[in-house]
Image (cartoon, rainbow, N blue to C red):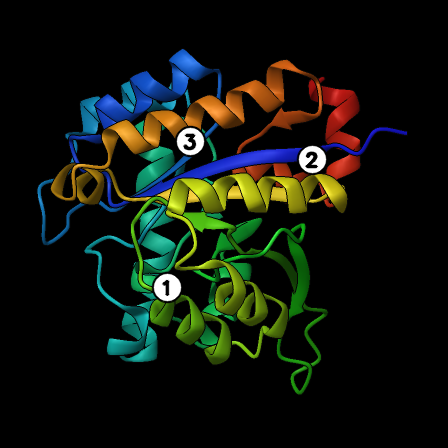
Amino acid sequence: MTNRCVVTTSWDDGHPQDQRLAELLEQHGLSATFYIPRKSQLETLSEEKVRELSQRFEIGAHTMDHLPLTSLPDVQAERQIHDSGAWVADVTGQPCEMFCPPLGKFQREHVNAIARHGFNGFRTVELLKTDPPTRRVRGDYVRGDKGWEVSSMATSVQAHPHPRSAYLRNAAKRASWGAFYRAWTLVGKTDWVGLVDVMLQQALRTDGVFHLWGHSWEIEEHQQWANLERAFAKLSQAVKSGVAVTATNGQLCASRNPASLFEQLA
């Protein structure tokens, strides 16, 4: 039986360059989740543009002010989590099911709050992984709460030219030794588009998930648009050939089992 995988992409910060990114995604027939804060340290899309984007792609929450949750008192961090989901739902007219902590920084209490406020999943910045979303149960068992379920999503490749040291730190911080080995043996021998090839094949071997993520403003800043189109072409070809299907982050977290998406989306 031919191995298959799910291809998903996600993009952070809601920069106006997301509009160019959305056009490329549509041209290549790829699904995406855009994690958008109400405001950020950089320019962000207007609410009208966010609403337009939501007609084609999933919109996830990214806090109200793009502040690291770990820099805030717990009450303020929880408000940033809750209010951003409510803001996305109000702007788009659709439920907000996904959350992404700014800069990938979060602690256990933040995961509890993400689950408690009704998000189905959250995306991390863990790299070089092809695992499906991990289902977690969170709650205060001391008080007797039954707990809330939430899925966490790792990523495969960032659309950015990282040095090997960045990948090694990313893996070591999470004690992800498979990713550490891949970083040690692969990074430096190819560019990030080459890593897309390697990790896509890894996802196919394991019936897993290939997850590309990044920032449109960073792609512009580092002149990575041509490389991004190369990466999209590779992913699009996998979908067109039938060895992969493409889904949003939210669809993956809702399915719990990537294999079930083949029947729904193929």
**Closer-to-camera residue (146/196):** 196
Is residue 81 visible to the viewer in this orientation of the structure?
Answer: yes
Q: Which residue is mark 2?
A: 5
- Residue that appears at 66% across and 27% down: 244
**Vertical position of residue 119 compared to residue 72: above or below:** above
**Closer-to-camera residue (80/188):** 188
Rendered location of residue 262, percent (x, y): 75, 26
Rendered location of residue 216, percent (x, y): 23, 37
Rendered location of residue 24, percent (x, y): 33, 19
**Closer-to-camera residue (149/264):** 264
- Residue that appears at 52% across and 27% down: 235
Q: Quadrant of residue 151?
A: bottom right
Rendered location of residue 45, percent (x, y): 16, 32
- Residue that appears at 24% across and 77% down: 71
The residue type indicated by label 1 comes to Gly
The residue type indicated by label 3 comes to Ala
Q: Which residue is mark 3?
A: 231
**Vertical position of residue 192 compared to residue 167: above or below:** above
Mark 1 surroundings: few (<14), some (14-19) or many (≥20) residues within 10 A: few
For this orientation, the residue located farthest to the front is: 189
Q: Earlier in the sequence, mark 2 or mark 3?
A: 2
Q: CA distance from mark 3 to mark 1?
A: 23 Å
Quarter placement of the N terminus:
top right
